[in-house]
Every structure is written in structure tokens, then in C-alpha cells.
Amino acid sequence: MDPKLTEEQAVALVRELNNIVQNDRYPLSPRIVTLKEILGLLRPEPERAAAAAPTDLCASDQGQMAPTPRLDA
């Protein structure tokens, strides 16, 4: 099912779903999880740019520890 909503209808629907999701006491309930999925369809997250994950980082920038030099000589 792919409802055709006007911009005004979509804004009202997103606002109401947002209020329901934000004010529910059980945020992990199946009902709220489903509503969050619907919100994601109506208001998709912005695409992450390829520049957000550069490949030329040093080991410490990638969350890895650089090897420490040994001092036993």
C-alpha cells in the first residue's frame, strides 16, 4: 500500500506519530517499533556521504591502537 498524501497531510501524520512515539511509556513495544518504522518511511534519514568514512585514516583514527615500541634492548 502506497498512500498518496499531500504535503500538509504528511506533515500532520509525522507530527502525530512523533508525539505518540516520544510520549509512550514503552518505547520498545512492538506497537511503537512499528510506528518508528513508519516514521522512517515518511521521513527517511539523510544519506551518509562517502566522505563520512574516509579510507586514508591512520590506525588510531580507525579505533585501533598503534603498536607500542618495545623497550627491551
Image: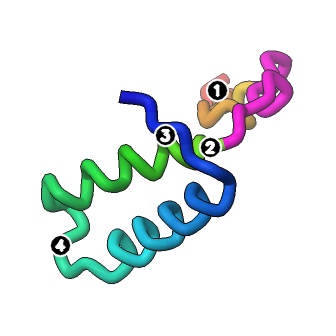
The mark closer to the camera, 2 or 1, is 2
Q: Which residues are magenta?
A: 46-58
Mark 3 or mark 1: which comes first in sequence? 3
Write down the residue under mark 3: 41
Q: Nearer the viewer, residue 12 or 34?
A: 12
Label number found at residue 67: 1
Q: Label 2, on which residue? A: 45
What distance separates the C-alpha of mark 3 from that of mark 1?
A: 45 Å
Tell me, yes or no, whether the highlighted magenta stretch contains residue 39.
no
> For the residue marked with disc 1, what is the amino acid?
Pro
Disc 4 on helix, strand or loop? loop
Residue at mark 4 to residue at mark 3: CA–CA distance: 21 Å
Q: At numbered mark 1, what does the secondary structure look like: helix, strand or loop?
A: loop
User: What is the three-letter code of the residue carrying label 2?
Assistant: Glu
Quadrant location, the C terminus = top right
Q: Indicate which label's residue lies in the foreground, 3 or 1.
A: 3
Q: Quadrant of residue 37?
A: top left
Q: Position of residue 24 (x, y in %)?
A: 25, 78
Name the residue: 72% across, 33% down.
48
Residue 35 as seen in the image, left or right of residue 70:
left
Residue carrying label 4? 26
Of the residues tagged 4 and 1, which is closer to the observer? 4
Front-most of 2 and 45?
2
Q: CA distance from mark 2 to mark 1?
A: 38 Å
Which residue is at a point 71% across and 26% down the rendered structure image? 59
The front one of 70 and 73 is 70
